[in-house]
Image: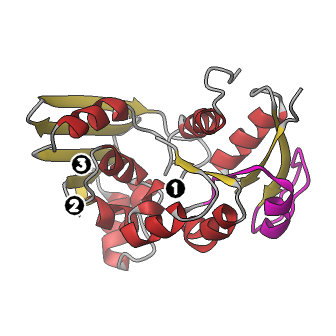
Amino acid sequence: MSPDIRVSVIGHGSIGRTVADRLFSGAMPGVTLVSIVDSAPVTNAPVPQVDLDKAIEISDVLIECAGQSVVFDHAEAILGAGRGLVISSAGALSDPAFVARLQACPGRMLCTTGAVGGLDLLGAASDAAPFDSVAVQTTKLPGSLVQSWMSEERADEVRSTQSALTVFEGGAEEASRLFPRSLNVATAVSFAVSDRDLVQVKLIADPAATLTRHEVIARGPVGNYQFTLENLPSPENPRTSAIVPFAVLRTLGVLLGRTGLIG
């Protein structure tokens, strides 16, 4: 019998905590959670909290649940050591030069689909012929869209809006840079259609948005596609959807060739 795959989770916030708890409970047979990595002390962790160097040493796969900066700062070290890496912060991969460096490493990486679906269909249609246009419109609660780079006046406008307010319009790369925890969906769609410059993004703050809504519209030579996803926001972090940890787990299964084994 082959030994279990050793997995460490980077980040113990709303996403990482759920991923770690599910793995520790045995949700994926043949996978053992061995450590947690976080910049802050973790209370009641199911396994030891260690630094990243130690996690790389003792793990076969690491799961990033901590934000784009962790991918920027540490993905090369993880992959360079030959470890597998599951990335939840897709926006970190919007720079082609950075992605090329990661792909040159011996380790294998996969990026989770996160809160969006339908990417297989978009990818297949894009392979047949490039799309003419692709648009992503995301609607979230206003408080989750306030960013540190906003002026105080703009932040107050977003936070206090009483009706739907357009917060951003532009390309997927800029969207992921300006809203790193809210628009990973845009980057995931741009990967699916193999064109970072084609995808146009609109971000709306709506105080009536009880669900996080993503609308994707793609038009091309082989067909027109439109689909809408409405996810409950995480109760702990409204910037992300509650479905994301489970998408991360499914991506781990794909990386390991063990899809369908998540209990």
Q: Is residue 55 magenta?
A: yes
* Nearer to us in this view, 226 or 160: 226
Q: Residue at x 54, y 47 (%)?
A: 110
Q: Secondary structure at mark 2?
A: loop
Residue matched to label 1: 89
Q: Is residue 54 magenta?
A: yes
| Vertical order, 153 against 85 (above or below) | below
Q: Nearer the viewer, mark 1 or mark 3?
A: 1
Residue 263 visible to the viewer: yes
Three-letter amino acid code of the residue under disc 3: Ala
Callout 2, which amino acid? Asp
At 12% across and 46% down in the image, what residue appears? 133
User: Disc 2 or 3, which lies upstream in sequence?
Assistant: 3
Location of residue 157 in the rendering, given as x and y in whole percent from the top left corner: 30, 66
Dot 2 crowding, Cα within 10 Å, few <14, some 14–19, many 20+ = few
Q: Is residue 194 left or right of residue 128?
A: right
Task: Compare marks 1 and 3 and give the one earlier in the sequence.
Answer: 1
The Cα atoms of the two marked residues, 1 and 3, are separated by 26 Å
Q: Write the start and end of the magenta stretch as one range.
A: 38-66
Residue 94 horizontal/vertical position (percent): 38, 63
Viewer-closest of 138 and 247: 247
**SS majority, magenta:** loop
Left or right: 68, with 220 as reference point: right
| Residue linked to disc 2 | 197
Q: Where is mark 3, residue-wise?
A: 164
- Judge by depth and name the residue closer to the eye, 1 or 131: 1
